[in-house]
Image (spheres, rainbow, N blue to C red):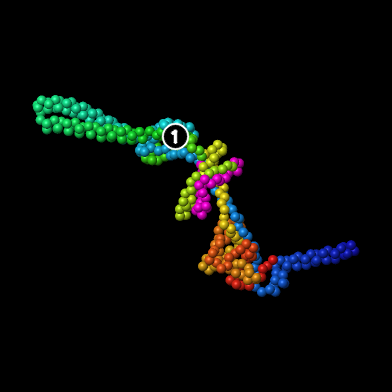
Amino acid sequence: MNDIRHHYPQQAIRFTVLALFMLLATSGCDREPAEFQARPGEAVRTATAEASPETSRLRLPGTVRPVQRTQAAFLQPGYLATREVVRGEQVSRGQLLATLQNPSLSPAVDSARARVAELEEQLAQAERELTRAERLAGTNAISEDELDRVRSRRDSLVQSGKQARAGLEESLATFSDSVLRAPFDGQVMTIHAEPGDYIPAGQPVFSLAGDEKGLEMEIHLPGRTAAKLMIGQVMIIEAADGLQTGTAVLREIGLAEQGRPAPAILALEEGSGWRSGQPVHAMVDFAEAAGLLVPLPALSSSGNGQAMVFVVDSDTATSVPVTTGRLFGNRVEILARDQETRSIEAGDQVIIAGQERLSDGALVRVLP
């Protein structure tokens, strides 16, 4: 019993000391130190503005594709009669790919051939008549007017024959459009129609990739970035899985349209092991003008929507209008503004908490 009474006061003392320590610690977290409470001004917290990197890297996605490629299509409408190739098949230039059924094509050729044959027969008869007329005119058996009439008929049939042969060639060319052949050596990548399907004129039936002119990839760049690149610039490319890297040369740069990025074409080095359809990323490095980075919480907005940052100058908050640029994690780039009388410089203390109560020129006290 004495041991219990002797031990209980010690437990009570330890509990009381622990409770007082926790109370004091909590009070220290919730309150500012007395030296800060005594100073005038709104309490704020700050961070240091830092210089932005002098070089930037964009990682842009793309897909490897053949330089030589086409969408093979018929120039006439009709029903797909036959398909002579399968997906992935290697084809040679001129190889038959498919045929089209169009009932109007064959009769047109037959009619044109018949017209040519008819005119050729008439022309042969006219030639014989002209020979006979010239012989008779030599003996004054017929007049010169009659000879001229026979000659004019022969000449007219010659011209009609030329027009008929041109019509036949046109009909044959149109009829040849019912046969689709490979325009170059390559591979069948995609088949868009099957026998029996109706094919409008110009609708792709096959996607073909050539074997001769190498591989390329297309990327899309912000207009501001595209303006800084040059044709012939070498870029690093990396497979989407990170297992393969290489280089590519910038071959073409398009123009950025309203609301759209600028397209650019990169030529991949030959024999590098890339394959068509492979997803890759292109790394675009370019120099940047020196700028500043401030934490995102430092940004606030004026009444007219202008982005602002408060800078601490000798316990005074100065509001600085800013133009923002790129994001770097939880920091934002501040672009230079030549028209400002006060600009932000590297090393300045910018307010990141408490600025919602401030106005330009307000007194502040910076919390540690």
Q: Nearer the viewer, residue 76 or 224?
A: 224
| 281 with respect to 190 (left or right) | right
Is residue 239 visible from the viewing direction of this image?
A: no
| 278 with respect to 111 (left or right) | right
Quarter of the image where one finds residue 132? top left
- Report the span colored magenta: 216-244
Q: Nearer the viewer, residue 27 or 298?
A: 298
Residue found farthest to the right: 2
| 228 with respect to 44 (left or right) | left
Percent x, y of residue 231: 50, 47
Is residue 22 visible from the viewing direction of this image?
A: yes
The residue under the point 73% across, 66% down is 26
**Identity, as a three-letter code, of the amino acid under mark 1:** Phe
Q: Quadrant of the C terminus?
A: bottom right
Category of crowding for the residue at label 1, using alpha-carbon neighbours closer than 10 angstroms: few (below 14), some (14–19), many (at least 20): some
Percent x, y of residue 134: 14, 27
The residue under the point 80% across, 64% down is 15
Is residue 256 a member of the stretch shown in magenta? Answer: no
Q: Quadrant of the N terminus?
A: bottom right
What element does badge 1 sit on? loop
Percent x, y of residue 348: 63, 64
The residue under the point 64% across, 63% down is 347
Q: Nearer the viewer, residue 128 or 240?
A: 128
Q: Is residue 153 above or below residue 39?
A: above
Quarter of the image where one finds residue 323? bottom right
Percent x, y of residue 127: 19, 27
The residue under the point 18% across, 28% down is 126
Q: Nearer the viewer, residue 219 or 144?
A: 144
The residue where tag 1 is placed is 184
Is residue 241 a member of the stretch shown in magenta? Answer: yes
